[in-house]
Amino acid sequence: MNMLALFAPPNLVDSLLLRFFSAETVNYVVWPFIQIGAVVTGIALWALYATYLERKVSAFMQARLGPMRVGPYGLLQPIADAIKLLTKEDLRPDKADPYIFFFAPFVSVAAAFIVFAVIPFGPDWGVITDINIGLLFVLSVSSVGVLAIILAGWSSNSKYALLGGLRSSAQMISYEVSMGLALVGALMFARTLSLSGIVQAQGLDSMWYILYQPLGFIVFLISGIAENNRAPFDLPEAESELVAGFHTEYSGMRWSLFFMAEYAAMIVVSAIATTMYLGGWYFPGAWRIDLAGHHSLFVLVSLFIFCAKMAILLYVYFWLRWTFPRYRYDQLMDLGWKWMLPAALLNIALSALAIFTVQALDGWHGMSTVESIARGVNLTLTGKIIMIAYGVAGVFIAAGMLSAINWRSRDFNLKKQRRQVRLMSPAQGQPAVAPATVASES
Amino acid sequence: MHQVEIATTKETLLDSPEMVLNMGPQHPSTHGVLRVILKLDGETVMDLDCDIGYLHRGMEKIAENRMYTMIAPYWDRLDYIAAVSNGLVWVETVEQMMGLVVPPRAHYIRTILTELNRIASHLLWLATHALDIGAVTVLLWALREREEILKMFERQFGARLTCHAWRIGGMPNDTYEGFSEDVTQFVDNFPHRLDEYETLLTENRIWLGRTVGIGVISATDAVAIGLTGPALRGSGVAYDLRKARPYAAYADLDFDIPVGENGDTYDRYLVRLEEMRQSRLIIQQALAKMPDGPVNAKVPKIIKPPVGDYYHSIEGPKGELGCYLVSDGSSRPYRVRVRPSCLINLQALRQMCVGHLIADVVAIIGTLDIVLGEIDR
């Protein structure tokens, strides 16, 4: 029914619903429920199939085939996995705290899924609710996920789980700082915290903020990957050290809830990155569909565009995971506090300077740079070029500054410390076994 | 062995900032059934102790009750990753005691197959070591090449892992048809594959961060502990039994010994990679020089070495693999003692680990390249 509602012209459904409910109920209760149902189903399915995709992507990188047995090309593998996990015995260690142990996975999943309430998948009915502090809501709710991991690690009453929980709490708290600060630069351009507003601001300026904010995007993406505990930052569940980290003691469906939460959190970070930096649902030329009067089709196309952008970012996740070794705990902290945080702060300063410069240049020697700053910063072509130049320069300035901060640290230039092995040819000693040529009998 | 002091009473447990963590015997990265008892302050290792013996099968005692020819298959189970090298040390020891003269062709075939086994062993080390540090893709890439070697072993010996490769006095049979083509093909493709692994690891920032300066052991300490193999050469000591006391056909072949400088995990990584390249050169030369002729010496039906004792050792993939054999003139050995390279290399673990983090313990266990089958015997 949910899916049907998505594909039927909303007006038709609307008129159908109005027969049974009052107009207010339809607007504020029935439609949101339909949207919530669609989003939760969609995201859960996506999380499920993200595991399949990850296995396939990793397989192709590793000269394997990946799942091939269940269904054509193993397409039903995630469903088989889900059934397996649902029917598995739900083990709880004897000495674990029963309530917290039971509770933690649900916190984890809830924190990951609630965020989707404000993610603008598309215009109009493509978003469940558009609150004016959307971004703050996202940041605050997604940080509840840390709590779930701490609770799980603590309540398991296992040393590995405890270490995993401690690691992840330290890691997520440190990276949340730089993640939040990285977004500030983009907010200066959008001048709103509403996520739909941010997308619209990019649409009005017809510019994706990744071009204004390349530094912010890089910092956000790295911090986001670290925030999700994904490789190369997957220390909390580093299987070679901590067995499985915070979910060592979990099994069956509760384990899979953590798993789902991880993938949902990945989708959240990709969605925020898409919204903030990749222009959300906008794509050059897509508005023509709306102009031609096919509004529902336009929303659907926008949904698809948004999801496609998210999928590209998700692929980056997979790509990194199967390419890089894992950071060590102290190196991770170094990266967070000595690289990401200064870069995020620098990004704020540079963005402010850039906006100030562009505004100051407006009208100087007849130069026109700013169109309006009422709904986000709208720039003329000249303004855009200056802004992009600032953005690109920012990356180099940041690289220089970070090198200046870190050049003394041990890990700064390991490549230079790299030594080649020497090849030596020591003198041959007395043979233990008579050499073959001498030993020939004939 | 050094004993970790463990706080036992409840009060001392609560007061002390230390936590005792049992890593293993069932743990993903202890390479078998090694149990490491770690005393941790936060994540820093204050002290550690190894508990071994979970895979003890009494090999040396079993050998006392078997005839000489029957012992060789047991030897494959010591270091099952490098069964061919293990078999070689046994047959060569008995041959030396008996004074058997092995035909040159057998020596060359032994050299080729042992070096192939060394590559296979190093590939598995690379795979697991990289996996321990978090690079999963290297695992499957390295196993892909190891598979080719194992296929050759299967064709030659009829088994992939525990091959029972040699007989006392030579080989059970000559090489199979197409052996040299298979080896040539592998040897030709191999450098390209090695370069592939290097693109993933050697200059990777994270890899460098995880290995440079980790588990440092100086040349003096390494010699004092008795480290051998790549672990010793990583510290800068150019000692290799293939050069120092050549066996099989190594005396005729030209190769170099890669030597590190700092004795850290990264140096040992580079040394092993370079060793694989050198092994490839050895195989190429041996294949070109391989003479024709018989592959088996004339051996008595029942092997009875003269009364006495003999020690012979070879350069296994993990280090000096020795065999001390005491014979009382009967058809069964009086006493057999294996010098296990892994056990002695493992002694360096505590010195290498203390002061590092848990993550480094995993990396250091990986870099020592231990096989529990050989440690516990």
Image (cartoon, rainbow, N blue to C red):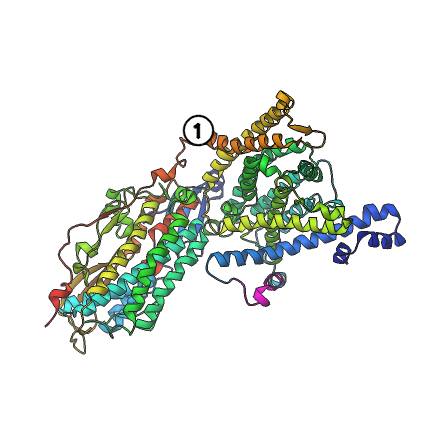
Question: Looking at the image, which residue is at 35% across and 38% down?
Answer: A416
As rendered, which of B36 and A257 lies closer to the eye?
A: A257
Left or right of B162: which side holds B252? Answer: left
As rendered, which of B86 and A230 lies closer to the eye?
A: A230
Are there few (<14), some (14-19), or many (20+) residues within 10 Å of tag 1?
Answer: few
Rendered view: B73 above or below A61: below
| Quarter placement of the N terminus of chain A | bottom right
Q: Position of residue A166 (x, y in %)?
A: 53, 42
As rendered, which of A275 and A367 lies closer to the eye?
A: A367
Span colored in magenta? A66-82
Rendered view: A353 above or below B206: above
Residue topped by disc 1 = A404
Residue A412 in view in this figure: yes
Residue B34 appears in which quarter of the rendering? bottom left
Left or right of A194: which side holds A344? Answer: left
Q: Position of residue B254 (x, y in %)?
A: 19, 56
Residue found at the far top of this picture: A365
The residue type indicated by label 1 comes to Ala
Residue found at the far bottom of this picture: B301
Residue found at the far front of this picture: A366
Residue B370 appears in which quarter of the rendering? bottom left
| A196 inside magenta stretch | no
Q: Position of residue A129 (x, y in %)?
A: 75, 43
Mark 1 belongs to chain: A
| A67 inside magenta stretch | yes
